[in-house]
Image (cartoon, rainbow, N blue to C red):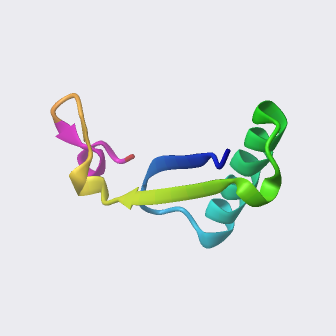
Amino acid sequence: MMPIIQTFLLEGRSREQKAGFIRAVTDAAVETLGVPVESVRVIITEMPKTDFGIAGRTAEELGR
């Protein structure tokens, strides 16, 4: 069983933050699913703040 975990994040996080997120998500999958660490895949899709809407406004307009 190879878990593939996909997440969507708004742009603006550092490489270090994304690497830490990947490690944490991988660790959570290993612990909760009982799979070997080598089998875990994590995909981060970054979205421009102009392409994400919240309550009719872009995340950029909202300062997020």
User: Dividing the image into 4 quarters, which one contains the N terminus?
Assistant: top right
Q: Position of residue 12 (x, y in %)?
A: 46, 63
From the viewer's perspective, is residue 60 above or below residue 48? Answer: above
Q: Nearer the viewer, residue 33 or 43?
A: 33
Q: Position of residue 7 (x, y in %)?
A: 49, 47
User: Is 29 colored magenta in this rendering?
Assistant: no
Q: Is residue 47 left or right of residue 9?
A: left
Residue at horizontal 56 percent and vertical 47 percent from the top: 5
Image-quadrant location for residue 28? top right
Q: Which of 55 and 31 is in front in this view?
A: 31
Q: In this view, does 53 lie to the left or right of 32?
A: left
Residue at the extreme left of the image, as rendered? 56
Residue at horizontal 41 percent and vertical 60 percent from the top: 46
Q: How many labels does the image show?
A: 0
Q: Nearer the viewer, residue 59 or 26?
A: 26
Q: Position of residue 22 (x, y in %)?
A: 67, 56
Q: What is the magenta range?
A: 57-63
Image-quadrant location for residue 34? top right
Q: Position of residue 32 (x, y in %)?
A: 78, 31
Residue at horizontal 18 percent and vertical 38 percent from the top: 57
Residue at the extreme bottom of the image, as rendered? 15
From the viewer's perspective, is residue 29 above or below residue 26? Answer: above
Residue at the extreme top of the image, as rendered? 55
Q: Which of 29 and 62 is in front in this view?
A: 29
